[in-house]
Amino acid sequence: MIDAIRTVQLSKAFHSEIAVNNISLALPKDKIYGLLGRNGAGKTTLLHLMASQYIPTEGEVTILGESVYENREVLSNICFIPGFTKHVHAYRVKDFLATAASFYPNWDQAFADELLETFELSPKKKYKELSAGMVSMLSIIISMASRAPVTLLDEPYTGLDATARHLFYDLLADDFAKNPRTIVFSTHLIDEASRLFEDVILIDKGSLIFHQPIEVLEEQSFTISGQTSIIEHALSTKNIIHKEALGNTTHVAIFDHLTKQEMTALMEAGIQVSKLSLQQLFVYLTAKRKGDSV
Ligand SMILES: Nc1ncnc2c1ncn2[C@@H]1O[C@H](COP(=O)(O)OP(=O)(O)OP(=O)(O)O)[C@@H](O)[C@H]1O
């Protein structure tokens, strides 16, 4: 089956700064991917490369099996919503929607109208008069109503309050169930958005750390607390990504499998074992790479 998005040894340098470093990804169709990374990790650059807004320094991108460069047919299958930019011009909300409608072959005007009502966004409002949250609402409406087979969202909710963000997550989950497509979604609000993700792509300093289904990550990330001597002995062969000791008690996070027997033995020894949230996993993995000792 043809992947929705493939990148092969993809790199992008801005002068001496390597923003994306040799990233190869194969993303099957009809999933929601969470694209995670610290500030400056290269997420925006990677999304721009996927959308053919940047020319790679090396490597290539294919969308639905075709090269994205100067390929209008492929581009009309991609809806790329860049991060927040506050342009000042006289266009009204309805003008943006009309432009999007003329570009995207699967544009769903009825859905766009419904979303305008849901977000209480007036189509007559001038773009320059929109608040930051309203600009995000407009971007979200375009991304959803475009019904593009490949949708790329770069932090799509700058300025949106918690209620509006949760409304967006619910709408996206609902619509995705009815109209599956491929969505790559970068965010720093990991825990609240993670319920949407089927796979997670983590990049750091331009390089791919992993691309994994979220349930695989959940099966191998644990936080473990208890008596130091027991923990040190039981976890000596595990991949410890975070460690804190307080007196005789140690708290560790591992990014590794625990067998049922290992789990039972820990619990019988009075050690507490629980799942690590995706956000905690992200913090520990990216902090570790910055040189923290564990
Ligand atoms: N147009 C540009 N010119 C020069 N350097 C750039 C340009 N765009 C990005 N960079 C650099 O490339 C690196 C990756 O930036 P990018 O915006 O892709 O990161 P990001 O993961 O999206 O970060 P954030 O989460 O802060 O938005 C950074 O070091 C940044 O300074």
Image (spheres, rainbow, N blue to C red):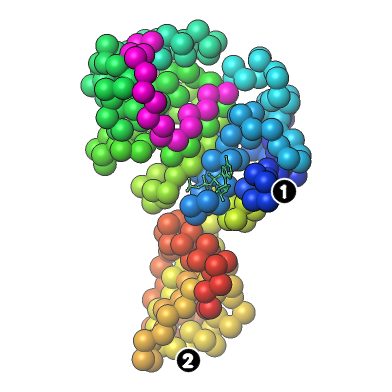
281 magenta-colored: no
Q: Nearer the viewer, residue 271 or 98?
A: 98
Residue interval drawn in magenta: 78-95
94 magenta-colored: yes
> Residue 139 at x, y = what percent?
40, 26
Cβ(mark 1) to ligand 1 < 8 Å? no
**Cα–Cα gap, marks 2 and 1:** 42 Å
> Residue 271 at x, y = what percent?
41, 80
Residue at image mark 2 = 229
Badge 2 or badge 1: first in the primary sequence:
1
Q: Is residue 232 above or below residue 180?
A: below
> Residue 245 at x, y = what percent?
41, 85
Q: Amino acid at mark 1?
A: Asn
Q: Is residue 103 above or below residue 17?
A: above
Dominant SS of magenta comes to loop
> Residue 9 at x, y = what percent?
75, 44
Q: Which mark is residue 252?
A: none
Q: Amino acid at mark 2?
A: Ser
Question: Pointers 2 and 1 in contact (CB under 8 A)?
Answer: no
Q: Residue at x 53, y 36 (%)?
A: 184
Q: Residue at x 45, y 35 (%)?
A: 83
Res 209 → quadrant: bottom right
Q: Residue at x 36, y 91 (%)?
A: 247
* Left or right for 46, reference 189: right
Residue at image mark 1 = 22
Q: Is residue 274 above or below residue 100?
A: below
Any part of residue 14 in sight: yes
Q: How many neighbours does mark 2 have within 10 angstroms: few (below 14), some (14-19), or many (20 or more)?
A: few
Res 78 → quadrant: top right
